[in-house]
Image (tube, rainbow, N blue to C red):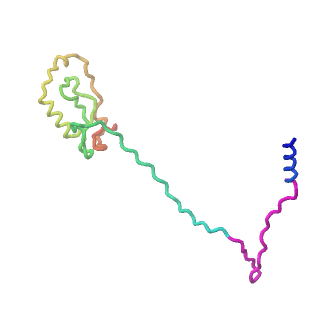
Amino acid sequence: MRCFGLAALLVLAGCGEPTPRPTAPPSRTGGAGTTADTRPQPPAVAPVPAVAPTPAPVPAPPALAPDPDGRTTCVGDTDCVATNWAGCCSCPQCSVGEPQAYSRDGLRRAEAACAAASCGNQRDCDLGGMCPPGESAANFDPRCRAGRCVLVRR
């Protein structure tokens, strides 16, 4: 009952006369019939300069596999060649390997090293159908990307 009495007292106290609303101060009349506003004005806010958005970072080129022998190292597209060279000790039926990108110097070095190699795999090469030919390297353009020769399909 005690809580009810307090609640009723609060309601009654709040139901009195309405709170008067503030009114604008009387204006003063300046010369020539104009009204001058003497109320304090808020300070002027300087405009905020527009900030240009930060550009998105440029993604790094994909990492290429290591090239310890320098067979694909390049500076420009003219350093690269697309080839079907099957590599050292390939059998005659495997003379057309999968297309690869080589640097011109790297291919020359690899072919020279193979000339001196002794493979001894003639018996394995006598098996028919062992190495079907790969796709022609003519379907690709050799390009130098991030210092490495790569193939780009035409």
Question: The C terminus is located in which quarter?
Answer: top left
Seen in the image, is 20 located left or right of residue 109? right
Q: Which residue is drawn at 78% across and 69% down?
A: 24
Q: Which residue lies furthest to the front in this view?
A: 2
Seen in the image, is 151 located left or right of residue 120? right
Span highlighted in magenta in the image: 14-40
Question: The N terminus is located in which quarter?
Answer: top right
Of residues 67 and 72, the one drawn nearer to the viewer in this rendering:
67
Residue 131, given in percent of the width and then of the height, sits at 25, 22
Q: Residue furthest bottom?
A: 31
Residue 30, given in percent of the width and then of the height, sits at 74, 81
Indicate whether residue 12 is drawn in magenta: no
Residue 47: quadrant of the picture: bottom right
Of residues 150 and 1, the one drawn nearer to the viewer in this rendering:
1
Is 52 above or below relative to 123? Answer: below
Seen in the image, is 64 located left or right of residue 50? left
Residue 66, given in percent of the width and then of the height, sits at 27, 37
Q: Is the magenta stretch mostly helix, strand or loop?
A: loop
The mark tally for this picture is 0
Q: Residue at x 14, y 32 (%)?
A: 113
Q: Residue at x 22, y 31 (%)?
A: 85
Residue 68: quadrant of the picture: top left
